[in-house]
């Protein structure tokens, strides 16, 4: 961004106290009331007529300059800088700097403190010198630039010129000043690569023109200049717009056909036009198409007329293909149509704009732009209108992996939800990458690649907790309980509730084997903290991988163990029957006993170490579990916890939860046959 | 990037290729012509695209002194092969006009912003008038005379089917080189050694590998990764193009890194510099160029049947994003980002699309700095799960814009009038509208002081004095109006006096307290 418009200094002649000839007729404000209220008109003649109010040239100039600043800061906040200086009778006053007061409200406050114009003689050249020195200071944006680019800028002198000779004289002296200032640059300051002097001459409404508008030549490669004369009054606004459009390479869009309710008659609506400014690149796609461009009489820039298209309510829910988005501002910001449009947009609605496209054969309409507010700023988005090279794309199902049907999409959706981004701060990307790495350490993308992740609800909490970077003690406990419940299910001979292809046909024990193997890998992959280690150790205990507990005997003692388990389960049954009177399930319990004793012959059943799970922190919290564990501990010293207890919600457990599911499955399979 | 084959069909293309060894003479009754070599070169390009990027659009334009679009942009490469074999012989060469026409044609088809790839296949004789063109392209108005648009990064490659020592080629080379130089991207290609089938094939292989090589990269999402390709292949990013200025170009890295996920609603249709389909790369090695196009077509279906059964990260990513209505934020190079999302051209077929932003971290203002986005789950309050937390997006800009606040603009006709009228409207509804009246009065008072316009305060005071006369003397309305008049006058006097520096007149005029009974 090394354009002239990156920084602008306004040097304002504070001695323009002469009348501009623009008058505000105060009497006109009183008339409508008299006629409207039905009072007799002759009555008005009793009053002494009110004097009209005169604007000074200074007032007209300030009105124009603040409008210029308003447009610039609406469209380029934080990237284009403007500073103000005033030259009064002798002294140059710096009003704002590159680092402060870069907003309309701030400079309005400064101008209020400055006060109205005071007669005197202003020393324009000392103002220019101060402005050039100001230009050698860097803006916040320049400070951020890594490679040095040309320090360019613009000095706008707001004054009243009397002749072309005077303008040329100022320009020559200005060129000399530039050379002087560049010679004496030191410290943090940077020399000026190019500066444009804009002599903005304000003359009274009825005064004849004194200078010719146009560029000033000479002065070498680093300086250019132009003279713009503005006659106070109604044409200032249009001239000012032309100036700001030229200085900042803006373009104008007129939104036409905006339906608006009439203020007087709410049932009818009329169509209005609103003119907007935005950077010219927003119209790059239509460059060369002059059929949609028109130039009004009072301006020297063209405006592109686009038609309002009544918005759909869900336009903001979709991704539109945009090539650019630029901030806009309305040209006549306080007019009723403008504020209607901007308020509509600020309330979150999006508006599509239609470009009439004239082809030799037919008139088609294309949505070419979109207006939308984001975070309080309104933007114009350029939509793609031409043919796209992406037309008729292949479907993802036709490509590699398109025929696979058992992707873990719900789990991936969960992964997406867990890795949403927010404004975070400097180390945000590292944190999110680290987290995403952790969440995908062990993430088979299809169900047929995994046993562990196909079990579903019984293991969900463990899978959720283990991928965290830290585990709380409660989470450790819950993870251990999941392991125990799986172990218990295995002991009881419940088949794993897995639907995937790879283990579907397998025997129960092979399913468990595959699951345990995958769980071990999963726990090992995520073994990153002391608490993770606790869960992993618990797993190892359960599988006698490490002789840690005295009760973990060698695998040869399986027979004896199974007896122990049988005993334990009987104890458990008794405890459950006592604590849950609703459950008169003593007879059903035996089924579990039988299967477990059958199963125990085939597979190695290990002794989970109760001691590891009864950490002191739990004793107060979980009453029933604790009571039962204590009971079991006191009588046996070692036993499996009751799986139902672990799953219990409010101490009520549905027994044989898988019974119905299995039945359903059987039904399903029989139906298939 | 759409490709235009600009094929020279001037009469000089009918010249036979000078025979070196003479061994082919016995087999071929008719001698090998330059246009036969040109046809071979075209077919070699099309075969290459069939294997590497079947989604590329190609068009065939022939030129002599005139030009003609023979086959419009299509993915049906066979229609171009057929057309190449059937082109006729025309008169003299004029590349300049052909380039102008090609640019017009591309603009019409793809709009102003789509870069195109132009491959000129010629016998290296620029023909009559070339020195004139060269002069026009070296003078001060070179940029205006240059037929290609400088705003979009098109590549221009000129393949000369002539022996390097061909006098006609030597005469034309400066013009060709000037074209390429002005365009900034592309080059002039001349065969190594004598012109023959073999040297043509070698030449084309070099062109294809330099300008038509597909993108091969890796998509990485945490520990998951897969090989992918992008269609169309991404181009280096060039912000602005000026004649004679070589800009620093940003090139995409070979690794697309998923950083995390954002909602579609939050990204709000961000502007993108380019869009690409993200396709899983087939695991087989790159097909060798010897396989015939027909064979490749049938072999392809076989491959897709096998490939379809190999699980792909792309499919699960696509499914997850589609299900959740989310996009994945990707880093495509240091300081350069894009989003990956499910996109469908019509209702049925959807695929993964990568929209690449303009390079930089501050390119989407409503997302904040892209290199400062981090995991929501690490915040004390996760805005996606905590119903009480504030939504994270859009990131608000600091200052309110003029259309989002009550700013005063008097430069336009009617601005001042309507503001004064508003005060009067409220004045006539006193004491009901006391607060609104003072609010508007203060707004105008402040603006008058800011614009250095204290005489307006005098005038306003005079109007309000007139209003006093039309209400009963002791009414509350009259009291408030008189109070306002006095305050305005005091304010005006203080503002006009250069010796007053206490700025007391900057503070608001407050309503006169008339109801002493109330406690507020």
Image: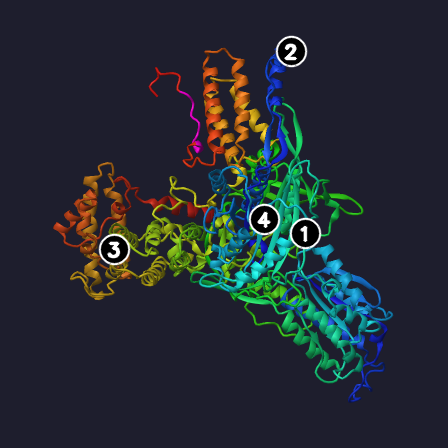
Label 2 neighbour load within 10 Å: few <14, some 14-19, many 20+: few
3 or 1: mark nearer the eye: 1
State which tag comes first along the sequence, 2 or 3.
2
Which one is in front, A108 or B273? A108
Residue A605 appears in the picture as rendered: no
Which one is in front, A35 or A583? A35
Q: For numbered disc 4, what is the local secondary structure?
A: strand
Q: Are marks 1 and 2 on the same chain?
A: yes
> Which region shows up in magenta?
B505-512
Q: Is A495 positioned to the left or the right of B41 in the image? A: left
State which tag comes first along the sequence, 3 or 4.
4
Q: For numbered disc 3, what is the local secondary structure?
A: helix
Q: Give the residue at x 87% y 70%.
A: B91
Q: Residue furthest right?
A: B91
Q: Are marks 3 and 4 on the same chain?
A: yes
Q: Are marks 2 and 4 on the same chain?
A: yes
Q: How is the image coloured?
A: rainbow
Separation of residues labelled 1 and 2 (CA atoms) = 55 Å
Which one is in front, B239 or A609? B239
State which tag comes first along the sequence, 1 or 2.
2
Image coords of residue A557 (percent x, y): 20, 64
């Amino acid at each position: 961004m090394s354009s002239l418009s990156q920084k602008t200094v306004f040097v304002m002649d504070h001695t323009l106290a002469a009348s501009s000839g623009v008058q505000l007729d105060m009497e006109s404000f009183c008339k409508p009331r008299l006629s409207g209220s039905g009072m007799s008109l002759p009555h008005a003649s009793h009053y002494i007529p009110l004097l009209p109010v005169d604007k000074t040239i200074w007032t007209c100039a300030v009105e124009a300059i603040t409008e210029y600043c308003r447009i610039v800061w609406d469209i380029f906040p934080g990237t284009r800088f403007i500073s103000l200086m005033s030259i009064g009778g002798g002294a140059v006053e710096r009003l704002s700097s590159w680092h402060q007061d870069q907003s309309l409200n701030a400079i309005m406050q400064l101008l209020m403190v400055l006060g109205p114009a005071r007669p005197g003689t202003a020393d324009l050249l000392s103002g220019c010198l101060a402005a050039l020195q100001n230009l050698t200071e860097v803006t916040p944006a320049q400070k951020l630039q890594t490679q040095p680019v040309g320090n360019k800028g613009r000095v706008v002198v707001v004054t009243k010129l009397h002749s072309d000779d005077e303008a040329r004289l100022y320009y020559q002296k200005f060129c000399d000043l530039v050379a002087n200032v560049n010679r004496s640059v030191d410290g943090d300051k940077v020399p000026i690569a190019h500066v444009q002097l804009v002599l903005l001459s304000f003359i009274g409404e009825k005064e004849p023109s004194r200078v010719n508008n146009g560029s000033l030549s000479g002065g070498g490669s680093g300086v250019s200049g132009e003279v713009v004369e503005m006659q106070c009054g109604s044409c200032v606004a249009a001239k000012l717009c032309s100036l700001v459009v030229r200085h900042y390479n803006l373009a104008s869009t007129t939104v036409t056909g905006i339906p608006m309710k009439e203020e007087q008659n709410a049932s009818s609506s009329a169509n209005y036009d609103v003119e907007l400014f935005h950077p010219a690149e927003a119209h790059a796609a239509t460059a060369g198409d002059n059929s949609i461009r028109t130039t009004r009489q009072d301006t020297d820039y063209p405006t592109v007329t686009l038609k309002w298209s009544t918005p759909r309510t869900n336009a903001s829910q979709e991704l539109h293909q945009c090539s650019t988005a630029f901030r806009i501002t309305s040209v006549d910001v306080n007019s009723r149509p403008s504020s209607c449009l901007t308020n509509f947009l600020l309330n979150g609605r999006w508006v599509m704009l239609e470009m009439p496209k004239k082809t030799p054969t037919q008139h088609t309409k294309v949505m070419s732009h979109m207006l939308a507010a984001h975070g309080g700023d309104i933007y114009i988005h350029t939509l793609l209108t031409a043919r796209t090279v992406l037309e008729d794309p292949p479907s993802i199902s036709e490509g590699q992996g398109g025929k696979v049907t058992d992707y873990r999409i719900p789990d991936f959706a969960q992964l997406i939800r867990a890795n949403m981004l927010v404004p975070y701060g400097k180390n945000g990307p590292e944190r999110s990458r680290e987290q995403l790495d952790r969440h995908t350490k062990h993430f088979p993308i299809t169900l047929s690649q995994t046993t562990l992740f196909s079990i579903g609800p019984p293991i969900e909490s463990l899978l959720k907790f283990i991928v965290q970077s830290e585990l709380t003690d409660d989470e450790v406990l819950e993870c251990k309980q999941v392991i125990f419940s799986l172990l218990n299910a295995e002991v009881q001979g419940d088949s794993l509730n897995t639907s995937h292809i790879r283990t579907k046909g397998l025997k129960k024990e092979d399913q468990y084997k595959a699951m345990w193997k995958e769980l071990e890998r999963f726990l090992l992959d995520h073994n990153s903290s002391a608490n993770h280690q606790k869960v992993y150790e618990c797993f190892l205990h359960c599988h006698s991988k490490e002789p840690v507990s005295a009760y973990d005997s060698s695998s040869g003692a399986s027979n004896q163990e199974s007896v122990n388990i049988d005993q334990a389960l009987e104890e458990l049954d008794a405890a459950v029957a006592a604590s849950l009177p609703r459950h008169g399930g003593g007879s059903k319990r035996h089924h579990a006993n039988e299967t477990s004793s059958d199963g125990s012959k085939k597979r190695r059943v290990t002794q989970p170490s109760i001691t590891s799970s009864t950490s002191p922190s739990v004793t107060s919290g979980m009453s029933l579990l604790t009571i039962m564990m204590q009971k079991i501990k006191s009588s046996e010293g070692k036993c499996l916890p009751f799986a139902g207890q672990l799953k219990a919600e409010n101490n009520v457990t549905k027994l044989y939860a898988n019974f119905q599911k299995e039945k359903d499955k059987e039904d399903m399979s029989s139906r298939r046959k | 990037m759409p490709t235009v084959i600009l094929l020279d069909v001037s009469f000089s293309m009918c010249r036979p290729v000078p025979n070196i060894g003479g061994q082919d003479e016995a087999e071929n009754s008719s001698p090998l012509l330059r246009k036969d070599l040109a046809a071979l070169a075209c077919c070699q390009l099309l075969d290459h695209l069939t294997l590497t990027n079947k989604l590329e659009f190609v068009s065939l334009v022939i030129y002599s002194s005139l030009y003609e679009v023979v086959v419009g942009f299509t993915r049906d490469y066979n229609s171009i092969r057929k057309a190449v074999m059937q082109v006729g012989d025309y008169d003299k060469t004029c590349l300049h006009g052909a380039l102008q026409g090609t640019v017009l044609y591309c603009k019409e088809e793809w709009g102003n912003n789509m870069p195109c790839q132009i491959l000129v296949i010629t016998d290296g004789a620029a023909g009559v008038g070339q020195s004139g063109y060269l002069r026009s392209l070296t003078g001060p108005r070179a940029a205006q005379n240059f037929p290609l648009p400088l705003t979009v990064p098109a590549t221009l490659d000129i393949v000369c089917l002539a022996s390097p020592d061909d006098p006609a080629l030597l005469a034309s080379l400066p013009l060709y080189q000037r074209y390429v130089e002005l365009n900034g991207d592309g080059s002039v290609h001349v065969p190594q050694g004598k012109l023959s089938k073999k040297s043509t094939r070698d030449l084309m292989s070099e062109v294809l590998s330099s300008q038509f090589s597909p993108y091969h990269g890796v998509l990485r999402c945490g520990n998951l990764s897969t090989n992918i390709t992008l269609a169309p292949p991404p181009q280096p990013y060039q912000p602005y193009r000026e004649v004679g200025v070589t800009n620093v170009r940003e090139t995409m890295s070979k690794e697309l890194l998923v950083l995390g996920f954002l909602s579609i609603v939050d990204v709000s249709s961000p502007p993108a510099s380019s869009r690409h389909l993200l396709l899983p790369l087939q695991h087989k090695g790159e097909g060798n160029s010897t396989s015939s196009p027909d064979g490749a077509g049938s072999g392809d279906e076989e491959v897709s049947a096998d490939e379809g059964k190999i699980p792909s990260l792309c499919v699960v990513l696509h499914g997850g994003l589609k299900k959740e209505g989310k996009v994945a934020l990707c880093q495509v190079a240091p300081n350069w980002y894009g989003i990956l999302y499910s996109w469908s051209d019509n209702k049925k077929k959807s695929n993964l699309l990568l929209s690449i932003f303009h390079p930089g971290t501050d390119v989407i203002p409503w997302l904040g700095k892209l290199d400062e986005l981090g995991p929501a789950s690490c915040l004390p309050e996760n805005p996606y799960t905590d119903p009480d937390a504030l939504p994270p997006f859009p990131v608000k800009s600091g200052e309110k814009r003029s259309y989002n606040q009550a700013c005063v603009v008097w430069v336009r006709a009617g601005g001042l009038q309507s503001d004064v009228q508003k005060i009067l409207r409220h004045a006539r509804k006193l004491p009901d509208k006391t607060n609104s009246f003072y609010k508007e009065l203060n707004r105008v008072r402040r603006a008058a002081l800011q614009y250095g316009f204290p005489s307006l305060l005098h005038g306003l005071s005079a109007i309000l004095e007139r209003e006093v006369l039309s209400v009963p003397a002791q009414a509350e309305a009259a009291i408030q109006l008189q109070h306002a008049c006095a305050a305005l006058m005091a304010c005006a006097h203080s503002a006009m006096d250069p010796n007053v520096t206490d700025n007391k007149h900057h503070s608001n005029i407050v309503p006169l307290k008339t109801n002493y009974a109330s406690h507020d």
